[in-house]
Image (tube, rainbow, N blue to C red):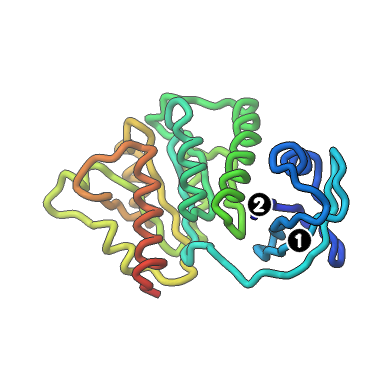
Amino acid sequence: MQRYFVPVDNWEDNKVSIGKDDAHHINRVMRLQPGDEIICNHPDGKAARCSILVSEPDRIQAEIDEWLKESVELPVNVTIAQGLPKSDKFELVLQKGTELGASGFIPVQADRSVVVWDKKKAEKKLIRYTKIIKEASEQSHRNKKPQIHSLMSVKELVRESSTYDIKIFAYEEEAKSEVYRSFGSIVNDMKLGDNVLVYIGPEGGVSDDEVHLLKENGFVAVRLGPRILRTETAPLYVLASISYQFEELGCR
């Protein structure tokens, strides 16, 4: 059953109104008719099975049949701070990271980022990224859409990191060392409901200045296995590992 995220203002009593973009998808792509069912997600994370009452080109009105008792959210809140990579690699991180359960994403203008965003480009990118996250959330039947934050520098990321319970960054020198802090040991220390911030550098990795700054502010350098991962692979490794630990092994 197709799922749609509906803004809070579009819920009234037992009725739900769906706006233009999703109405077009319902009418033109899914070809649903009055009487057909969809799932509507409220911004608070609840989901309802609804029946379509009115179908217009720019608007769908549906009636709530049943509130669903479900949650597929990762029991640990993981925010991925990604050093801006080249090409469309960040879009891959957003899409697959959403499917794997990330709670948020922060684009980071890192020392070794080849890509540089100005304010105008950042605003345009965030509009596109919001759409990618929404579609990936619907496809993977998420209860909540991950948050996409505004572009930050590493210094700004550090200033905003005080609310997180666990802060780590992937550091390739840890993978080369015989004495290292494994990511697995960090995951074993995680508890249900923890807020976790993971910084992944761009293609060139994390600069010496960034390493010093991050460590000074409570970030732990970890290795993500013995191999050097691409920048777009590393966050997916992190999320899949946490999901396996908490959702498959049942380590709660």
Quadrant assignment, res 202: top left
Q: CA distance from mark 2 to mark 1?
A: 11 Å
Is residue 9 at all visible to an observer of this figure? no
Is residue 57 at all visible to an observer of this figure? yes
Q: Identify which residue is drawn at 59% across, 39% down.
A: 132
Q: Amino acid at mark 1?
A: Cys
Please tell me the numbered disc located at residue 2.
2
Image coordinates for residue 17, horizontal then vertical, percent? 83, 53
Query: Is residue 12 toward the left or the right of residue 188 in the image?
Result: right
Image coordinates for residue 205, horizontal then vertical, percent? 32, 35
Q: Identify which residue is drawn at 34% across, 69% down.
A: 249
Q: Amino acid at mark 2?
A: Gln
Which quadrant of the figure contains the N terminus? Answer: bottom right
Please tell me the numbered disc located at residue 157.
none
Examine the rendered structure and indicate whether residue 249 appears above or below residue 172: below
Residue bearing mark 1: 50
Q: Secondary structure at mark 2?
A: loop
Q: Identify which residue is drawn at 61% across, 60% down.
A: 143
Query: Is residue 50 toward the left or the right of residue 167 in the image?
Result: right
Chain-order first, disc 2 or disc 1: 2
Mark 2 surroundings within 10 Å by alpha-carbon count, few (fewer than 14), some (14 through 19), many (20 or more): few
Image coordinates for residue 47, horizontal then vertical, percent? 68, 63
Which quadrant of the figure contains the C terminus? Answer: bottom left
Q: Secondary structure at mark 1?
A: strand
